[in-house]
Amino acid sequence: MSRNLYEKAPAASRDTLSRPLLTRSLTDDMEEKDDLRVANLDNIDLSHSQQPPLRIMTNTAPPPVTWMSLPRRGQLAILFLSRFVDFLQVASLQAYVFYQLKAIDQNGSATPRSDAAISTQAGLLQGCFTGAQVLTAMLWGKAADASWCGRKPVLFIGLFGTAISCIGYGFATTFFWAAFWRAIGGGINGTVGIIRTMISEIIKDKKYQSRAFLILPMSFNLANMIGPIMGGFLADPANTLPSLFGDGAIFGFQWIQAYPFALPSVLNAVSLGLSAMVVLFCLEETSKDRRGKFDYGLYLTARFQQIVLRRRAADGYTRVDFSDVAVESVPMLAVSEKIKKPASQGKLPFTRIWTRNVILTLVTARTFTLPASIILLNNCSPHPSVLGTIHGLGQSTSAGFRTIGPVVGGWWYGWGLQHGAVEAGWWGVAAMSMLGCVSALWIYEGSGHEISLEGDETESQEADD
């Protein structure tokens, strides 16, 4: 019978059947089977086996970080837009502020001021904006950290309030009111620190941070290119573009004739207002104390998608049907044991914020290349509960240097001219840069949570469970 099976088998199978691997005779006793099963193991031929060969898994390099691999790109795009329109109103103003102040002076005084006096007024006008930021940026950061406010309301107030200040500045007829509205715009504008904080809370993985924080200098540089072009092109449009804005033209409104430098400010106000609406209806809260709570703006957006776009509303709630479930079958005791009240995270006192790493980072942050300085500032925060305050301090420090720097630099340069040493100002800048480099040697990249408060360990254990 065995011979007949061998003759009927295919030629490919005869070689396998002819080998002595696992060969046994049907008439052999059970005691001889174990010896025969281990015979000739070196002659195993797996060429006709139906099982695929084993593959050796090797460690491959992780894929490179790209823009498309960034998480929550929609939220990052909103923050990019907010930073872009925020600096656009500053950059566009620089193109025509001298001519606007000169026109105001000619209309309001019998003896026009010299160009040097107008330049001094322009510097004071810039100082009003940055000086107000020095005083209020840290307060906006503390409000963003508070449980009663959050990041999103501070960003919305900053954008919408700056839009109102642009309207007031565009229609100002005296230097006093122009300076007043610039100070209002700077005092209500705490957007830079809030945007940095929200990016760091959206992007938790450090491998994405260097690319995510690039949206700040990218938006800044883009606004710095477009702003002066827009401001110079639209300032005094009745004279520069008479076919569109002149008397009798399609856009020749009376207010454009009466306020020749109002049009750029009006466009800035419109862009800031639209950006504020996008923040209100599309941006999600990132503060730990406010995240997950009811958001009226997101709710209206979800209802709009449900009614107009015929989409299911994704407002975070799902209806659960208990009609077919018996009350006795629900293990209420087991459920109640698993539900735990989240540990309340304490707030780090303001006096404990000032660690050595925080102070050195704030002082030397302006000497580093972006976004490295932003990442260092973000990670030097001693506790997550004061992250918004830290970025508010960074914005205040930056605004302070931008306020004091031109004054000190101008005085230093003037002193060098009087003493026949024009290069003195540049040597002074080089000396300050060297001091910044030396102090940077003691800066280290922190973890963002170097000080532990009561309840932090319990909260981290519950998160792991």
Image: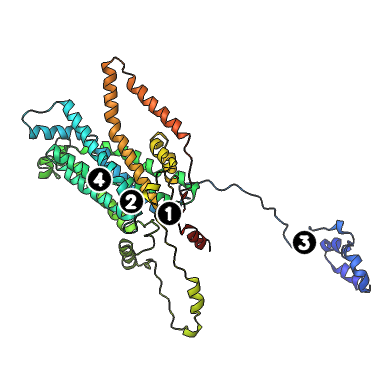
Q: Quadrant of residue 92?
A: top left
In this view, the residue in front, 195 or 229, is 195
Which of the marked residues, 1 or 2, is nearer the chain's N terminus? Answer: 1
Q: Earlier in the sequence, mark 2 or mark 3?
A: 3
Q: Mark 2 belongs to which amino acid?
A: Lys
Report whether residue 225 is seen.
Answer: no
Q: Which mark is residue 142?
A: 2
- CA distance separating discs 4 and 3: 78 Å
Q: CA distance from mark 1 to mark 3?
A: 48 Å
Pointer 4 or 3: first along the chain: 3
Q: State the residue position of label 4.
A: 187
Q: CA distance from mark 2 to mark 3?
A: 70 Å
State the mark number for residue 72.
1
**Side (left or right) of 328 relative to 163:** right
| Residue mark closest to the camera, 4 vs 3 | 4
Circle 2 Cα neighbour tier, 10 Å, few/some/many (<14 / 14–19 / ≥20): many
Q: Could you tell me which secondary element the residue under label 1 belongs to?
A: loop
SS category of the residue bearing label 3? loop
| Residue sitting farthest toward the top | 420
Q: Which is in the foreground here, disc 2 or disc 3?
A: 2
| N-term-proximal mark, 2 vs 4 | 2
Mark 3 lies on residue: 49
Number of disc labels: 4
- Give the x, y percent position of residue 214: 41, 43
Q: Which is in the foreground here, disc 1 or disc 3? A: 1
Three-letter code for the amino acid on which mark 4 is drawn? Gly
Query: Which amino acid does the dot numbered 1 rest on?
Result: Arg
In the displayed structure image, the side of residue 339 where residue 186 appears, left or right: left
Q: Is residue 169 above or below residue 307?
A: above
